[in-house]
Amino acid sequence: MGMAHRGRLNVLCNTLNKSYEEVFTEFEGSYDISQLQGDGDVKYHMGFSSDHVTSQGGRVHVTLSANPSHLEAVNPVVLGRARGKQRQNNDIASRGSVVPILIHGDAAMAGQGLVMETFQLSQLEGYTTGGTIHLVINNQIGFTTLPADARSTRYCTDIAKMVDAPIFHVNGDDVEAVVHVTRLAARFRREFKRDVVVDIVCYRRHGHNETDEPNFTQPTMYARIAEHPRVSQIYTKKLLERGDIQQAEAEAIATIMQNQLQDALNTVKVKPSKLTRSRFTGVWQGLSNAYSHDPVDTGVAIEVLDRIGRALSTWPDGFNIHPKIRRLAEERGKVVSSRGRIDWALGEQLAFGTLLAEGIPARLSGQDSRRGTFSQRHCYWYDIKTRERHKPLDHIQANQAKLCVYNSPLSEAAVLGFDYGYSLSEPNMLIMWEAQFGDFVNGAQVIIDQFLASSESKWGRVCGLTMMLPHGQEGMGPEHSSARLERFLQACAEDNLQVAYCTTAAQHFHILRRQMHRKFRKPLILMTPKGHLRSKAASSDIQDLISGRFREVLVDPSPKPARRVVVTTGKIAHELNDRIAQDKIEDVSIVRIEQLYPLHEQLLSKVLKGFGERYELVWCQEEPQNMGAWTFIAPALRHITGKEPIYTGREAAASPAPGSAALFQLEQEQLISSALGISARKLAKAHH
């Protein structure tokens, strides 16, 4: 279940059976502070799970997902969690074992674009959950805004017409009609595996919250509400008139309820309820959230790579493979069999394949992810006559895990939210979301800030989602250059994220494998430069996949003691090395930080101490000074070395990159020369 905060405590207590004592303990603030895990959150954002006993004596496990004040942001998260649980139940066909339920407010239903994006997922191959039951608590007002000011449609539920979902409108004062219609909705979902909506038309008695004064803005509406009998009074009167209960019984029920609440409050004032719950049970057994820099052996036997190479270069008899794909496939098979250089895209495919061979499934979703935005991946092949598809990595060996790759709708927020939700359910699967261009991650900022970066601290919710974000200055203009590395680094604290900017295919291979071979789960944010996909400098020897592992810091040593040490990250390192080789510079060394956070300060310190004390310390980046990693890394470099690092890179800018390819090239040349001290060296030589 997913819902916003209004009515949440009611649902927690009366549907999920959260004890009154626990709720009062949270509100009284009388708990032992040592029980807290992380920073916590306000009470009506928290999630909860319990087993509900049905009237027939069966058991239903009910989960209410944690949700921030971004009202509908939880919607795709719930769907992703449901899909993950369905997969664990091997419920791919009927999708009836887990049912997603979303509870909306009327204003949010009509106003939040994520609602439309979530409906759009409902029947898609990679995102369907067999239908969602939507309940709209229609209070006919959003904060102080009336429907006429909040939407352009007659009903707040008109958005659901886009997927032809049945919409039931029911009077919230008629309790039995609400139950009847909700049962109809549940039956419809079970029978047709499609979304269904119940619009419960009611009102809000106390304004936006219990301390709000709605008469300031809605005096006529609230004058009528004040005279209107409560639902409990209406239903009690109906039951009395039918003879179903007696007046004394009705009064006794109210008294018992009041006494239960008062007794619970009195109890917690004497002895607060215990709040701590174990987070690593069930499928999370054996995992933790404690980060470690301990190295992880992720090398793979050559025999395994050979099997994957054969799978990547083989197709079924009668399959009409595209000529260009045929050449690509044959070349990939040849590279592996001849022990050649592995390019970035092949290294990634080998990472997926080795995990599958170990029984670890993988899921990748994003815009154009099957082919790859830059026509580099091709993990699905299509028969050019029949469009029959073939997935080579599903044919490595018997008893392997499956690879699931989906082209997503043109959505960032809903799809990232869905995959985040999936990762909450499934820690034993490599789950990846890929941005078509890194900049497109902007459209999912709410999911990143409110869920991915802070869910462990706020709600104790751990996940291992991997985000792959194409990044790098290549003269393609501001909209295709930056995955906003600086925003992720700014959100880093308490070991909440892993942020990496790898420079070789082997590093990419090992970090993907490392994600599944650690005993903890943390989100992994990968800057994946477009220029690396076919770059010889970013390619790796196959031996690096066999015996290597991910290294958080790499050094490109010069043959002589370094006069200047340039610390950098990502794509620009190769351009610096190219210039060093071209100009035969012998007194400059490049240090590549492959993982920016959590920064392995001890390792970086050891590397830099190897250069002695008399070198110039330079930081180089191609992003503008107010972007990229500079503001994050500068304090760390000062702390580690005691030196003041020299900044070399683009000047601070409002836009991530220049729109002109010529201007980009000029700026790139200037920052490379500045980083390597070329201008200063030439001047000194001329003076001598």
Image (cartoon, rainbow, N blue to C red):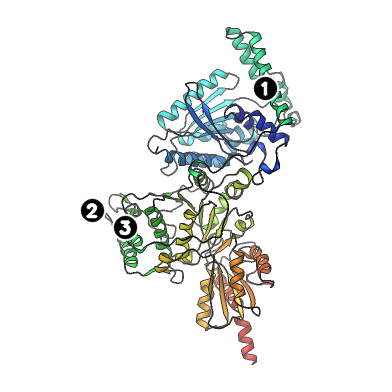
Q: Whole-percent x and y of residue 299? A: 42, 62
Judging depth in this view, the residue of 122 and 242 nearest the camera is 242
For the question of whether residue 604 can be seen, the reply is: yes
Name the amino acid, label 1: Gln
Looking at the image, which residue is at 43% across and 53% down? 369
Residue placed most toward the observer, 570 or 61: 61
Q: Residues within 10 Å of mark 2 (few under 14, many from 20)?
A: few
Give the labeled residue for mark 2. Answer: 318
- Asked if the residue at tag 2 contacts the one at tag 1, i.e. Cβ–Cβ closer than 8 Å, the answer is no
Residue 476 locus on image (x, y percent): 52, 64
- Going by the image, does 419 lie left or right of 607? left
Q: Secondary structure at mark 2?
A: loop
Residue, x 46% and y 72% (percent of image)?
537
Q: Nearer the viewer, residue 466 or 669?
A: 466
Q: Nearer the viewer, mark 2 or mark 3?
A: 3
Amino acid type indicated by mark 3: Ala
Toward which corner of the image does residue 307 lie, by quadrant? Answer: bottom left
> What amino acid is labelled 2 in the image?
Gly
Quarter-wise, where is residue 103 in the image? top right
**Which residue sits at x=37%, y=62%?**
301
In the picture, the disc for residue 311 is 3
| The C terminus, quarter of image | bottom right
Q: CA–CA distance between discs 1 and 3?
A: 65 Å
Q: Are marks 1 and 3 in contact (CB under 8 Å)?
A: no
* Element type where label 1 sits in the image: helix
Q: Is residue 652 visible?
A: no
Q: Which residue is mark 1?
A: 260
Q: Of tags 1 and 3, which is closer to the observer? A: 1
Give the x, y percent position of residue 318: 23, 53
Q: CA distance from mark 1 to mark 2?
A: 72 Å
Going from N to C along the chain, the mark reached first, 1 or 2, is 1
